[in-house]
Image (tube, rainbow, N blue to C red):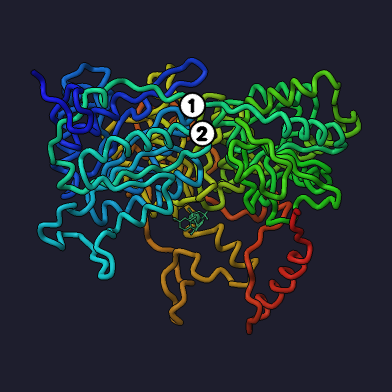
Amino acid sequence: MSPTSPANPGCPTRRLTTAQALVAFLARQYTERDGRRQRLISATWGIFGHGNVAGIGQALMEAGGGRSGGGGNGGAGNGAAHRMPYLQGRNEQAMVHAAVGYARQSGRLSAHAVTTSIGPGATNLVTGAALATINRLPVLLLPGDTFATRPADPVLQQLEVEYAGDVSVNDCLRPVSRYFDRITRPEALIPAALQAMRVLADPAGTGAVTLALPQDVQAEAYDWPEEFFAERDWHVRRPAPDTHELEAAVRAVRSARRPLIVAGGGIRHSAAEETLAAFTAATRIPVASTQAGKGALRHDHPADVGGIGHTGTATADELARTADLVIGIGTRFSDFTTASGTLFANPAVRVLHLNITGFDAHKLAALPLVADARAGLEALTAALAGRGYRVDPAYETEYTGAKEAWEERVEASFATPDPTARPTQTQVLGLLDALVTEDDILINAAGSLPGDLHKLWRTRSRDQYHVEYGYSCMGYEIPAAIGVLLAAEGRTPRRPVWALVGDGTYLMNPTEIVTAVQENLPLKLVVLQNHGYASIGGLSESVGAERFGTAYRHRDADGGFTGPPLPVDLAANAASLGMRVLRATTVDDLRTALSEARDAGGPTCVYVETETPDTVSGPPPAQAWWDVPVAETASRPAAVKAREEYDRQVAARRRHL
Ligand SMILES: Cc1ncc(C[n+]2csc(CCOP(=O)(O)OP(=O)(O)O)c2C)c(N)n1
Ligand SMILES: [Mg+2]
């Protein structure tokens, strides 16, 4: 007679450690949406130390091996389908970024797990977890935790909290996780693992999910009910709108004379791009996009008016100022989008918001339309169809003309009158623009590039524009590109994936170059050297802080940082980590280097020192405000003047009620 499980009397069992059971369980979870089925957790990243080496580490060793699951037996006696591939990272935060890149490229239908040791390995996850959660992208975090049985406190790397014996540093992950549990007994894994999958596959609730795993429990054996290891499908739902909310939305659209759509990342997550195109074809409502929503329509779609907000186009921002109905779709309405509450300036403006979360749908006192973006747009299109709504042709002519005028400004920024000169940053983008096709994917997150890209980039396909601007986290780009490459693997021809980074961002987190080299992934890294935090330097100047602390320079005689630039060679650094590096000095060099990098089969870095624009055009300036509070009292005139301007802007802000 086979033993029966204490968790489920009568059910046949498998005796495994908690870690082995977790890995075997994860290898058998699937998501399904629109008839497509895929592994929910397709691989596990890990850096081992005490806290996971003998638990999850041993279980992963049994369960998988190679990148696509070669070797091992699936961890619980089953075949290749249930292997758990292992990916080796260099830095825990970066492993989460890679997992996030993977999840975004996978349409949130597939995700990675990340396992760490206890203490610093675990707390290194916090930034990555916040980034995942803010962007609503699924990642499963498996930090090791201190002993549940506490035979010898403190263990190495255990921070003791004198007033609370049940707190560990992993509690830092609670506020940045959409679900958190600590598995202090083996059988507690059963409900926790199921809840974790529910949250990861929930389109309204997904983000970082943390299962903290005390290291003694990981290695402890238990008689698991066999049913725990059955394949399980998690349907990713598309909630349809409520009829009352839909009727109100239809009335709002029908009475609008100057409607404007604000397309957010929810369109991408819902794969609603074609539905949006059909909606605009019927109504001719113009579409502006947030950073996460750029690509909702192709740049040359007649209704696409480009980025909106502080980093937006003049076209979109002017339409936003005069709109009588702002139709948000899947956006968080962040301060960059609303110009810190100053952009939707028409006194008669109303906001309608189609969003899968009630939380976002109610922002700006909007008329909520709580639904999946695709399902909501389909319902709205159908409900409007019989009633023949379409914007006035004069409105269409107005935004089409404004779009053409903006296009001329893009052209001017991209122009390279002197091919022997050092390129400006916008010229670097222009050269890329001339090179790429709809296959290429561009990744960026922080510095001055997100603003330039949002204003200028001509997005050619739904997933080309990958700018992480929820957390705008320096150091996201390189690991995220690895995740994107892993998600796009198997596609022929291979998709060119570009990580665009400033020098500051490079220095923050170049470590996963080694991972790209190890996996021979054809990462294309473009490093733009301008000797410091140019974006923050510009911001600092505008708020009267005089670029303090933003340049990478030697100290001067007074102790400030105005000496010569530092003798740092980032190209040599990338080469030392194993990349092929192409150095470009002039516009012509750069054109050749980018083209060579695009064709390269292995990880390749293009390194270029950029010129600060003076004789040639830079990017167009901001078309809308961003609230960064300025010192109310200061001794230097620059700050006093900046505060006067600040007060003027604040006076224009409105609360939407
Ligand atoms: C992890 C992190 N720390 C700090 C910041 C604040 N920040 C935003 S942009 C920036 C400077 C980026 O420098 P670089 O990559 O060289 O780009 P540049 O501004 O020169 O274009 C800083 C410090 C951030 N976004 N992320
Ligand atoms: Mg820089």
Above or below: residue 17 compared with residue 38: below
Of residues 53 and 55, the one nearer the viewer is 55
Mark found first going from the N terminus, 1 or 2: 2
- The quadrant of the rendering that contains the C terminus is bottom right
- Name the quadrant of the N terminus: top left
Name which residue lies at 56% across and 35% down. Answer: 465
Q: Is residue 483 left or right of residue 12?
A: right
* Residue visible at 23% across and 17% down in the picture: 80
User: Residue 440 placed where, x, y %?
Assistant: 51, 28
At x 56%, y 52%, the residue is 448
Residue 631 in sight here: yes
Above or below, 169 against 319 in this view is below
Q: Residue at x 33, y 46 (%)?
A: 181
Q: Quadrant of residue 89?
A: top left
Q: Secondary structure at mark 1?
A: loop
Task: Please report contact status of discs 1 and 2: CB closer than 8 Å, yes or no.
Answer: yes
Instruction: Measuring from the top left, give residue 6's x and y in whole percent.
Output: 18, 33
Label tally: 2
- The 10 Å Cα crowd at callout 1, few under 14, some 14 to 19, many 20 or more, is some
Name the residue beneath numbered marker 1. Answer: 236
Q: Nearer the viewer, residue 179 or 272?
A: 179
Image quadrant in which you'd find residue 29: top left
Left or right of residue 407, residue 468 in this image: left
| Residue type of the residue flagged with mark 1 | Val
| Residue underneath mark 2 | 203
Disc 2 marks a residue whose amino acid type is Pro
x and y percentages locating residue 400 in the rendered image: 82, 32
Which disc, if any, is residue 253? none
